[in-house]
Image (cartoon, rainbow, N blue to C red):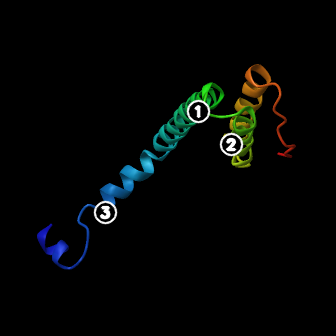
Amino acid sequence: DMLMRRRGEDPYRVEKRWFLDSTEGLREELLELWRIERERHSLLKLRGRLNRVAEDRTLSDQQKAARVVSMYQATTDDDTGIAARDVISEFVAESMPGIVLPNRTD
């Protein structure tokens, strides 16, 4: 091991490659589960932010509407952004029906 390292070689490269190749499917599954959980957590946090805006007594109705519309416009066009727009749209329909969200095409 020491001689190979001195020459800049990795004595465990074959074992490392075998491990990476044999666990690729599992690692991809775990990554997808992590992404799903992260998205779920982000959407829960978004609902909390929307509630705080709606309940903020220091903001006028126009300021609240501007913040919600801004949050809506800041979403991305990927699956997470589409889910966030759905959360915002549902929240507006239920809690702030006077707000008109801009049209977006997905």
Position of 54 relative to 6 (above/below) = above
Position of 21 relative to 57 (above/below) = below
Q: Quadrant of residue 15?
A: bottom left
Helix or strand or loop: what does disc 3 sit on?
A: helix
The residue wearing badge 1 is 49
The residue wearing badge 3 is 13
Q: How many marks?
A: 3
From the viewer's perspective, is 41 left or right of 10?
right
Residue 11, horizontal then vertical, whole percent: 23, 65
Label 1: how many Cα within 10 Å (few below 14, some 14–19, many 20+): some
For badge 2, the amino acid type reads: Met
The residue wearing badge 2 is 71
Label 1, label 2: how many angstroms apart (C-alpha)? 10 Å
The one of 17 and 73 positioned closer to us in this rendering: 73
Helix or strand or loop: what does disc 2 sit on?
A: helix
Residue at 74% over, 49% down: 77
Label 2, label 3: how many angstroms apart (C-alpha)? 47 Å
Lower position in the chain sequence, tag 1 or tag 2: 1
Helix or strand or loop: what does disc 1 sit on?
A: helix
Label 2: how many Cα within 10 Å (few below 14, some 14–19, many 20+): some
Lower position in the chain sequence, tag 2 or tag 3: 3
